[in-house]
Image: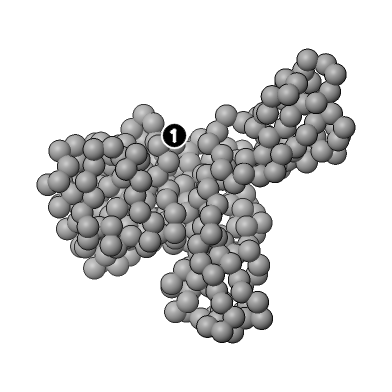
Amino acid sequence: MFRVHPSTCPDSTFPPQMQEMNYGCGTTVHPAELSQEPTVLYVGIGGGLEALQFAYFARRAGGVIAVDPVPAMRMAAARNLEIAGQLNSWFDPSFVEIQAGNALSLPVADAAVDVVAQNCLFNIFEPDDLSQALQEAFRVLKPGGRLLMSDPIATAPIPPHLQQDDRLRAMCLSGALPYETYVEKIVHAGFGQVEIRARRPYRLLDTQTYDLPVPLLLESLDSVAFKVPVPPDGACIFTGKTAIYTGSESMLDDQAGHILQRGIPASICDKTAAKFARDNPDDILITASTWHYSGGGCC
C-alpha cells in the first residue's frame, strides 16, 4: 500500500477507508503535470483515493472521470467520495464523475482528456490486452496529453508458471514486465516521450514460496508518457541521466539542440546520452540514471 504524502494535496483529509482500499504500488499524482485544471481520466477507481487527489487539481464538476467495470467498486468509491466531501471544504463529489467501463474500451471520445492515469492496473493484463489498453489511453488523450502510470516491473523475466497463475496476477505479483519491455510497449502505442518519475523496490519473490531458483525482485515504476510524435531517431526516454562537458572550451554546441556549459550537468534523454558517449567520449561525462526525473531536459 502506498501512503499519500501530505505535500501532494495540502490541507486535505483522506477518509481512512479510502486509504485502506488503496493498493497501488506507487503514485500517479504528480503536481507538475496537473496545472491549469486538467480534465483527468482515471482508469480503475479503487477506493477513490487518487481520483480525490486529481480532483484537488481539477476542482470543477466532471473534472475527473473515473472508470471501473465493477459495480461494487464504483459504489464503494462513491461512498468514500461523499465522506471526503464532508471532510474537505474544497471538494464536492460532483468533481468526480464515476462511469462504468474498462481500460480496453474507454467510454470517452477521441482526444477528449488532458491526462489519463492508472495505478497498478495495467500489469495484470496479458501482453495483447496491455497493448490495447495503452492504445486506448493514447486515443482519448489530446495532443500533448500525458499518460501517468505506476506499475510493478520485474528485474528479470517472470517464469511462465507464475505468469499463468491468475491469483498472483490479480495480486500484481506475476504480470510485471522487465523495464525495457514495459517502456517499449508505451513507445509502440505512439508516445514519443517517456519520463521516469520514480523507481523503487516493491516486492521480493522468494525461492520457496514461488518455486524460483533465485529470488526475484519486483520494483515500482512511476512514469509519465507524452502524446507527442515519436522522433525519426526514436522516442526520448528520460531516466535522470545528465551530460557534463569537460573539454577546453567554455561550452559545446552539437548543432542538434544541445548546448553544454563546461562543468555544469545538463539533463538529457537516454538516446542523447548514447550519442554523446559514442561521438564525444573524451569531452563529455555521462552520469548514471537516477530513475528520478521531473522535466527540463534536452528534447
Toward the top, the furthest residue is: 250
Closest to the observer: 208 or 241? 208
Look at the numbered disc 1 and give the secondary structure of its residue: helix
> Residue sitting at 23 percent across and 50 percent down?
14
- The quadrant holding residue 48 is bottom left
Residue 277 higher or lower than 249, as above or below? below
- The quadrant holding residue 250 is top right
| Image colouring | one colour
Instruction: Please give the count of numbered marks on the rendered protein.
Output: 1
Q: Amino acid at mark 1?
A: Ala
Q: In this rendering, would 74 be left or right of 213?
A: left
Q: In this rendering, would 143 be left or right of 85?
A: right
Closest to the observer: 50 or 17? 17
> Quick one: label 1, few (<14), some, or many (20+) residues within 10 Å?
few
Q: Position of residue 285 (x, y in %)?
A: 78, 34
> Residue sitting at 59 percent across and 80 percent down?
207
User: Which residue in the protein does label 1 denote?
Assistant: 32
Residue 28 higher or lower than 214, as above or below? above
Q: Position of residue 224 (x, y in %)?
A: 51, 44
